[in-house]
C-alpha cells in the first residue's frame, strides 16, 4: 500500500475524533503563493509526489487555472499529520486570491474554523489581503500568519537578517491592525499573531522550507543562518532540516481550533435559530449523535456523477442512503458519500460532525443551502459577499438546436458559482450572465464551450449600472386602474451608515423580521426616527420601505401587494430599468375601497408602483456606475505612462507613494473604463508593472454622460429611448 492510500486509511479512522480534526483555509492576495504552499503541505503529508509539489499544483486541477497560473476554484484536500505522537486529520481549502473570485473565498470561510494568511514578504499586506482577512474574521475564523518568499528578500533585495526582521515586524503589525479592526470583539486581543508564541511562520513555499520560533528552538537555526543558506544556494539542505509541511501543520494544530471548540462560538454567528433546541445544542457541541445539520459551501458539476454538494457538517452523522431535507428544495437521498483530495473523491460509508463531506444525491442544493435530517430546520445565515456582479454579457447558442441545452448549462453554472448571476428572459429570449469582472466571465465562457461543449456567441461586455435619487420626492399619488384606491409615497436617499449595515448583513433582507425589536434599536442608532423605524415593512437590496401611516382601514390586507410593488420597482428602476440602490420609500397615506374585490393585485400593485416611480422622478433620478480601486506598482520612469493610462479611462489618482525606485499608485476607475486594461497597462509600461484591483462600490455617472448612457441602456433593453417623467405616472 502506498503512502497516499495509507494516509487515506488513517484519515477514515480519525474522522470521528473531533479533537483530532482541523478545518483550515489558505487565503492571500493574488500571487502571494497560496497554491504552492497547499501543494507542499499535501506532498509533505504523502498525498502527492514531493518532486511535483509546487509544480503540479494539485489543487489548481482545472485546466483554466493551470493555463492562467491562478486559483479560480476553492479546492478541498484532506491529509493526515502526526504531532506530538498523535495523528491529526487536516481538511484544507485553498482559495482564490483574484478579486473576481472573491465569492469562492466567502463560501470557503463558512466551512473552516481557522485560516493561514499568506503574505509575500516583498509586497507586504496588499488590498486583497485585507479583504480576505475581513472575510475570515466576519465568519469568526481564527488566523495564523505565514510570511512567504523570504528567499527574494535575500537574493533580490540583498537584505541582511536585521533588515529582514524589520520588514517582518511591519507585516505582522499590519496584519494585527486588521485583526484588531475586524475580529469579533471577544477575540481582538486573543487572536493577535505573535512570533514569540509561534503563530507566525516564515519561509519559501516554492523551495519547501519554513521556520518559526518553536522550530528555531528545536533545530537551532537562526535568521542569520537562513541568510547564509539562501545566499549559498543551499535551500534544499534547509528544506531537509526545516520541512515546510511540518512547521506549518504544527502551527495549525497548536494554534487553530478543533471543530468542537470553534463551533461553541461560531454557531451563534452563522445560525440564528434557538440555541436551546435539539439541533442548536448539537451544533454548539459538534455532537455526531444529534440531528444532521450541514451547510453546502460548494457545488461541483461532475460529467459522470452529476452534482456533488460539498459542505461542512456541523452536527449529526451522514450515512449512505439517508434522506435529507434541503432548505427551499425538498428532499434528497445520499447516493454516494466521499472525502475530497483535490480532484479525487475517496468514497466513505459515513461522515461525522466537524468534517467536510462531498455528497451526490442532493439535487436541489445550491451553494449556501442548509441540509438537515429535520424538515423545518432554521437555515444558516446567508453568506455576505463583499461585491456584486458588475459586468454582464448577453449570450446565445450558436445553433438553435443547442438552446435548451444552453439554458440547462446556465442553470448548472449559477448553481456551482452563485457569484455568477444568470437572467433568462423568456419574453425576449435574451440570456444575460453577470460576473465580478472580465476574467470571471472569460473563465465561465471557457467552461460553457469546453466543459459543457455548447457553442455560444456573446455580446461585448456590458457594465451593470444602478439607479438612485438625489433628494426628497413626493408625496406622490398613485391611482389604481379602477380609480378606487390611492397610495401616497415619499422617497429619499438612504443614509450611508444604513446602507453599510444592510451590506454587512446586520439588517436582514425581506419582509419577515425575526427580532423586530433589536432591528428597530439598530435603525435608531443609525439615525432613523424611532416611529419610522417601527414601521419598517421591507428590505430589498440596499433599499427600505416604511409604513408611517396611522389607522388606515384595510391597509393590512393590501400590505403584501404593496411590498410586491416596492420589490418590483427596486429591481427595475424608472430611469433605465436597472436595480435601485440606497433608496428609502415611505408610505405616508392611502385611500382604500371598502370592498376587497376592488383592491386585488391588479389594482394595488400598479398603484403602489406608480406612486414610488413618480416620487423617484420628483426626487431627481441619478444613474450610478460601478468603480474599482486599482493599485499599480511601476518603476519611476514608467509612472507617466501608467498615470496617462488611468486618466484616459476617467480614473482619478487617489494616492501616490515612492518606495525606492518603485512608485505605488492608487486610483479609482469606473468599471466601464477597465475593459482591456490588463494588456493596455502592460503595453504602456513595457511590461514593467504589477497591478491589482478591488471593487469599490458605485459613484454617480458624470451629468454630461448620463443621458447618453441611459438612452443606450434603454435601447438595448427594447424600451423607448426617453425615460417617462412624473406626469406620466400621475396620469395612469
Image: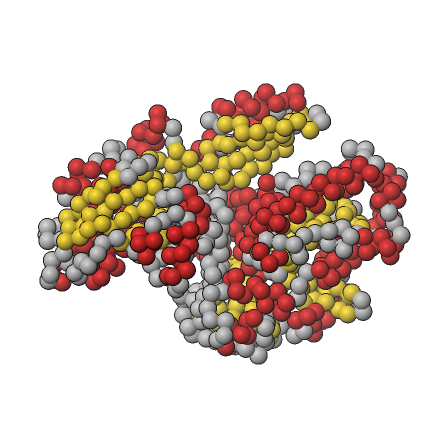
Decide if residue 176 is on the left or right side of residue 416: right
Please state which of residues 313 and 511 is positioned toward the viewer in this rendering: 511
Task: State the residue at coordinates (37%, 40%).
Answer: 466
Coordinates of residue 211 in the picture (x, y in percent):
80, 50
User: In this figure, which colouring scheme has been used for the structure?
Assistant: secondary structure
In the displayed structure, would residue 86 be above or below residue 657?
below
In the image as oriented, which residue stretches furthest toward the bottom?
A: 289
Asked where in the image residue 623 lies, by quadrant, the reply is top left
Task: State the residue at coordinates (79%, 39%).
Answer: 164
Coordinates of residue 344 in the picture (x, y in percent):
63, 61
Is any atom of residue 722 visible in this view? Answer: yes
| Image quadrant occupied by the C terminus | top left
Please state which of residues 643 and 205 is positioned toward the viewer in this rendering: 643
Please state which of residues 500 and 221 is positioned toward the viewer in this rendering: 500
In the displayed structure, would residue 654 be above or below residue 5?
above
| Image quadrant occupied by the N terminus | bottom right
Task: State the residue at coordinates (56%, 24%).
Answer: 643
Total residue callouts: 0
Coordinates of residue 677 in the picture (x, y in percent):
53, 31
Coordinates of residue 691 in the picture (x, y in percent):
60, 34
Task: State the residue at coordinates (59%, 40%).
Answer: 127
Please state which of residues 291 and 200 is positioned toward the viewer in this rendering: 200
Is any atom of residue 47 visible in this view? Answer: no
Decide if residue 383 is on the left or right side of residue 24: left
Amino acid at each position: 500500500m502506498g503512502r497516499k492510500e495509507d494516509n487515506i486509511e488513517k484519515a477514515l479512522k480519525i474522522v470521528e475524533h473531533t479533537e483530532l480534526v482541523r478545518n483550515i483555509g489558505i487565503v492571500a492576495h493574488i500571487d502571494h503563493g497560496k497554491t504552492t504552499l497547499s501543494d507542499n503541505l499535501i506532498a509533505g503529508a504523502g498525498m502527492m509526489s514531493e518532486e511535483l509539489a509546487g509544480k503540479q499544483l494539485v489543487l489548481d486541477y482545472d485546466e483554466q487555472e493551470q493555463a492562467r497560473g491562478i486559483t479560480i476554484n476553492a479546492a478541498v484536500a484532506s491529509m493526515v499529520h502526526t504531532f506530538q505522537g498523535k495523528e491529526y486529520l487536516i481538511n484544507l481549502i485553498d482559495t482564490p486570491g483574484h478579486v473576481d473570485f472573491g465569492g469562492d473565498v466567502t463560501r470557503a470561510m463558512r466551512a473552516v474554523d481557522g485560516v493561514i494568511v499568506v503574505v509575500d514578504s516583498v509586497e507586504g499586506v496588499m488590498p486583497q489581503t485585507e479583504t480576505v482577512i475581513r472575510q475570515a474574521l466576519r465568519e469568526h475564523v481564527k488566523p495564523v500568519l505565514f510570511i512567504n518568499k523570504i528567499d527574494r528578500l535575500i537574493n533580490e533585495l540583498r537584505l541582511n537578517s536585521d533588515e529582514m526582521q524589520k520588514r517582518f515586524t511591519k507585516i505582522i503589525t499590519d496584519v494585527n491592525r486588521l485583526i484588531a479592526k475586524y475580529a469579533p470583539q471577544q477575540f481582538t486581543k486573543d487572536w493577535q499573531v505573535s512570533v514569540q508564541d509561534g503563530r507566525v511562520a516564515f519561509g519559501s513555499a516554492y523551495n519547501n522550507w519554513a521556520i518559526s520560533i518553536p522550530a528555531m528552538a528545536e533545530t537551532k537555526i537562526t535568521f542569520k543562518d537562513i541568510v547564509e543558506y539562501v545566499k549559498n544556494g543551499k535551500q534544499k539542505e534547509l528544506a531537509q532540516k526545516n520541512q515546510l509541511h511540518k512547521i506549518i501543520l504544527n502551527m495549525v494544530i497548536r494554534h487553530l481550533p478543533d471543530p468542537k471548540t470553534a463551533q461553541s462560538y461560531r454557531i451563534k454567528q452563522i445560525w440564528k435559530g434557538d440555541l436551546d433546541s435539539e439541533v442548536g445544542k448539537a451544533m454548539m457541541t459538534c455532537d455526531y449523535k444529534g440531528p444532521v445539520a450541514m451547510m453546502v459551501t460548494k457545488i461541483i458539476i461532475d460529467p459522470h456523477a452529476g452534482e456533488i454538494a460539498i459542505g461542512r457538517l456541523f452536527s449529526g452523522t451522514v450515512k449512505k442512503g439517508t434522506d435529507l431535507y434541503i432548505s427551499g428544495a425538498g428532499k434528497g437521498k445520499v447516493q454516494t458519500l466521499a472525502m475530497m483530495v483535490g480532484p479525487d473523491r475517496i468514497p466513505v460509508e459515513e461522515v461525522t460532525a466537524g468534517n467536510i463531506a462531498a455528497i451526490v444525491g442532493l439535487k436541489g442544493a445550491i451553494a449556501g443551502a442548509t441540509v438537515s435530517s429535520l424538515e423545518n430546520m432554521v437555515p444558516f445565515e446567508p453568506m455576505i459577499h463583499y461585491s456584486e456582479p458588475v459586468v454582464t454579457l448577453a449570450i446565445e447558442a450558436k445553433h438553435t438546436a443547442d438552446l435548451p441545452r444552453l439554458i440547462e448549462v446556465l442553470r448548472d453554472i449559477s448553481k456551482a458559482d452563485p457569484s455568477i448571476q444568470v437572467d433568462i428572459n423568456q419574453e425576449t429570449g435574451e440570456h444575460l450572465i453577470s460576473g465580478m469582472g472580465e476574467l470571471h466571465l472569460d473563465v465561465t465562457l471557457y467552461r460553457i464551450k469546453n466543459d459543457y461543449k455548447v457553442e455560444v456567441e456573446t455580446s461585448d461586455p456590458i457594465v451593470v449600472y444602478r439607479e438612485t435619487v438625489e433628494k426628497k420626492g413626493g408625496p406622490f399619488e398613485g391611482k389604481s386602474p379602477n380609480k378606487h384606491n390611492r397610495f401616497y409615497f415619499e422617497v429619499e436617499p438612504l443614509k450611508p451608515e444604513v446602507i453599510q449595515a444592510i451590506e454587512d448583513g446586520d439588517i436582514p433582507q425581506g419582509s419577515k423580521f425575526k427580532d423586530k425589536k433589536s432591528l428597530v434599536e439598530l435603525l435608531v442608532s443609525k439615525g432613523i426616527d424611532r416611529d419610522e423605524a417601527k414601521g419598517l415593512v421591507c428590505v430589498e437590496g440596499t433599499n427600505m420601505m416604511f409604513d408611517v401611516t396611522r389607522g388606515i382601514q384595510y391597509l393590512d390586507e393590501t400590505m403584501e401587494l404593496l411590498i410586491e410593488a416596492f420589490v418590483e420597482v427596486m429591481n427595475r428602476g424608472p430611469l433605465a430599468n436597472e436595480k435601485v440602490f440606497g433608496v428609502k420609500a415611505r408610505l405616508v397615506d392611502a385611500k382604500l375601497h371598502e370592498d376587497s374585490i376592488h383592491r386585488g393585485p391588479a389594482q394595488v400593485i400598479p398603484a403602489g408602483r406608480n406612486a414610488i416611480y413618480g416620487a423617484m422622478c420628483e426626487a431627481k433620478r441619478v444613474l450610478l456606475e460601478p468603480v474599482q480601486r486599482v493599485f499599480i506598482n511601476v518603476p519611476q520612469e514608467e509612472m507617466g505612462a501608467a498615470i496617462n493610462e488611468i486618466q484616459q479611462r476617467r480614473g482619478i489618482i487617489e494616492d501616490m507613494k515612492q518606495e525606492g525606485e518603485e512608485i505605488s499608485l492608487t486610483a479609482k476607475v469606473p468599471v466601464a473604463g477597465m475593459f482591456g486594461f490588463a494588456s493596455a497597462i502592460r503595453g504602456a509600461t513595457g511590461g514593467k508593472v504589477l497591478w491589482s484591483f478591488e471593487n469599490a462600490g458605485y459613484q454617480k455617472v458624470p451629468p454630461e454622460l448620463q443621458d447618453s448612457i441611459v438612452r443606450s441602456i434603454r435601447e438595448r433593453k427594447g424600451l423607448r429611448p426617453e425615460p417617462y417623467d412624473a406626469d406620466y405616472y400621475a396620469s395612469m
